[in-house]
Image (tube, coloured by chain):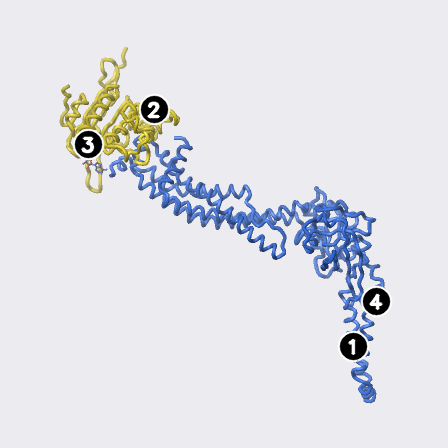
Chain colours: A blue, B yellow
Amino acid sequence: MSFGELFRDALYTLWRQKLRSSLTIGGVLVAIAALVALLSFAGGMSKNVRDQVEKFSLLQTMAVSPATSDSTEAPLDSTALAWMTTLPGVLQAYPQAPFPVHVVLGDDTTTSDAQAIPANSRGSLLFSQMKAGEVFAPEDTNHVLITTSLLDRFKIEDADSLIGQKLLVYSEHGHPDSGYAAVRDTFMTSLSGRGITGIAEMLRGGRMDSLSAMMFGQFVSAFFDGYMNRVRVVRDTLIVSGVVDGGEGWTDRLRPVVLPEVSARRLNPGSFTQDPMSLIGSMQSGEAFNPASMLTETDTAERVTLELDATADHETLADTLRAHGYAVQDFAEFYAEFRKMVVLFTAGMSLLGFIAMFIASLGIVNTMVMSILERRREIGVLKALGAEDKDIRILFLVESGTIGLVGSLLGLLVGWVGVEIVGMVMQEYLRRQGVGDVELFYIGPETILIAMGFGVVVATVAGLYPASRAARLDPVVALREE
Amino acid sequence: MKPVHDTPTKPDGTSPLLRVRNLVRRYSSGANEVVALSELTVDLERGHSLALVGRSGSGKSTLLNLLAGLDRPSSGSIEVNGRDLASLNRKELAAYRASEVGIIFQAFQLIPHRTALQNVELGLAFIGNGRSERTARAQAVLEQVGLGDRVQHKPDALSGGEKQRVAIARALVKNPTLLLADEPTGNLDRESTADIARLLAATRDSGISLILVTHDLDLAESLCETILELEYGRVVQRREAVR
Ligand SMILES: Nc1ncnc2c1ncn2[C@@H]1O[C@H](COP(=O)(O)OP(=O)(O)OP(=O)(O)O)[C@@H](O)[C@H]1O
Ligand SMILES: [Mg+2]
């Protein structure tokens, strides 16, 4: 008999025993559906990462940041950047020195991060994911690039609609003037609060020391309070020239607002504003009153994106950079690790599926043993008609394999529908949480192959023992039975 | 020049279809040993027919199973077409069953969930014919046995006589050289018995050798040239039928 006939017969046999078959097939269905769900989750994870890696050509880039919080040890300054571009395989080094800004678009205001556009970065991988418009020219000082994440912040869907729009960018930062004003106010209030008599008393009691100490303390704290009040505002109105996908999370490489260098210099309040002690230092050197002078974007880059050529030796490059005290995020390395993890994860998930399938296979063994017990005479007849042991074995193996096939097909269907539903619900939930579209589950061809192959193979293996029992049946004994 | 054989050859030079020599089949269940067949020797010429009669338990079915290649003897030999069944391995024995022997049972042994046609087709399932050829031949044989209009019926929907006709069709569809029938009319009434007798006679006349196990002496006499009576696994009487 041909395989097709055996298969048709097997389907018919299962059809004759509807209840028993559906229970057994149900076991396989659950196992395969679970396997599909687990694998598609792993698949979704891996696809998301793969898509990101491909989208941003991450395998051709490397992210460098200071290894320790003490950035003086290995500063990402212009010297360091220049050195990095001389390393073999490095095409360009793009700094990212973010600073906080407020952004006004129409009636909406939001707080975000800005950075200067790195020199020579036009046409680089940084801007490989333009969504609308284009990168402004280096000499162009009144345009701005924004990323899709800023778009999300403003809840704007259509990137094109933004091109040519006006974007007001401003930053607030402390200024010595506001500090002096605060000192003056505090001092006067303090004196008037105590009254002339209080001061006279202090003077009379010879307590000049305590007075001056008190006054100095008040002076200092008032100065910093006032300084940190950020009364000084720098603003720039720029025209949106383009919208770019700058990545998010680990793929992040562009801040939401990418400014011409001139604007960045004006708007960046400088890192010292966060640290009063460095302010004192800069006041002494006179820089505090000319903050822009120290604001080249490379000075305090938090992160540098290296663009590599195809032949770059990632390992050597990363080693070199690490030896110089930098932390290196090599996406190729990361991706290789990630893929290893996905394989392990998939294996782990498959193990769970295997356990479920093992339980299902006990049901298959039971069903097959029952089926064979009921059909002993039939087996005897087939042997009397010339069936070899092999024929009988194949007959029942095809039958158990068919249970696996039908169960896997249904399991695949149920798993797919289930994953779609869960995916939709999760998607909606994430959207409400403000997270963009993420494909949580992905059923690729390999998932289908693995699930189907697994179901059919395990079911067939489960049929091995019953089938060989059937094949060994003595036809004389079987035919004598009533 | 004719080859010299130590076996008796017929004048035309052909050896008998079946040569059974000193056949022994013992069953041992625990300490007890049952000798179902004991030193049985018999020949059957091509195209001839033989009836086996005897009391219940005399070893008739045992002999038939051995001849069918469903069982192996404890000792002795069975030669079919000059070939010793003992020399065949399981696979070859299956092929022998598939192509050379047709078997009919008292209990019909049809497969209940298959139609008459499918049951008959099974008779060709292990020889290697294509599906359409199997169907065509099965259909033709069913028409021969007078069941051309019942091919799509399942055994449950057929009478005892019709079931046995289906079983005969299944045995004949492969065109066997040897037809073994184990009490084929044991479960049938007189009329059906007559139908089956006619069919078996036609089969015998078409040149297929027949071995018939039966309790019905009339049937044995009407169908077979030779009648062997067995007792305790031995031939106790051999006579030629009066025709
Ligand atoms: N599997 C077996 N194990 C033990 N003894 C057996 C077995 N099969 C048959 N026998 C014994 O062998 C002897 C011959 O049995 P067999 O079935 O050949 O008789 P029979 O002539 O066909 O009888 P009946 O007319 O009742 O069918 C009997 O005594 C029987 O009990
Ligand atoms: Mg018997």
Give the Cα distance between marks 4 and 1: 20 Å
Tell me which amino acid carries mark 2: Arg
Give the Cα distance between marks 2 and 3: 28 Å
Q: Which residue is mark 2?
A: B137
Q: Nearer the viewer, residue A280 or A260?
A: A260
Q: Are marks 1 and 2 in contact (CB under 8 Å)?
A: no
Q: Which residue is mark 3?
A: B186
Q: Quadrant of the C terminus of chain A?
A: top left
Q: Which residue is mark 1?
A: A218
Q: Earlier in the sequence, mark 4 or mark 1?
A: 1
Q: Is residue A226 above or below residue A267?
A: below
The image shows a total of numbered marks equal to 4
Counting from the top left corner in percent of width and height, residue A27 is at 42, 47
Give the Cα distance between marks 3 and 1: 124 Å
Helix, strand or loop status at disc 2: helix
Give the Cα distance between marks 2 and 4: 110 Å
Q: Are marks 2 and 4 in contact (CB under 8 Å)?
A: no
- The residue positioned 14% from the left and 27% from the top of the image is B236
Pointer 2 chain: B
Tell me which amino acid carries mark 4: Met
Counting from the top left corner in percent of width and height, residue A174 is at 79, 66
Q: Is residue B49 above or below residue A56?
A: above
> Callout 4: few (<14), some (14-19), or many (20+) C-alpha neighbours within 10 Å?
some
Tell me which amino acid carries mark 3: Gly
Counting from the top left corner in percent of width and height, residue B25 is at 22, 33
Q: Is mark 2 within 8 Å of ligand 2?
A: no
Helix, strand or loop status at disc 3: loop
Q: Which residue is mark 4?
A: A283
Pointer 3 chain: B
Q: Which mark is residue A293?
A: none
> Does A147 sit left or right of B146 as displayed?
right
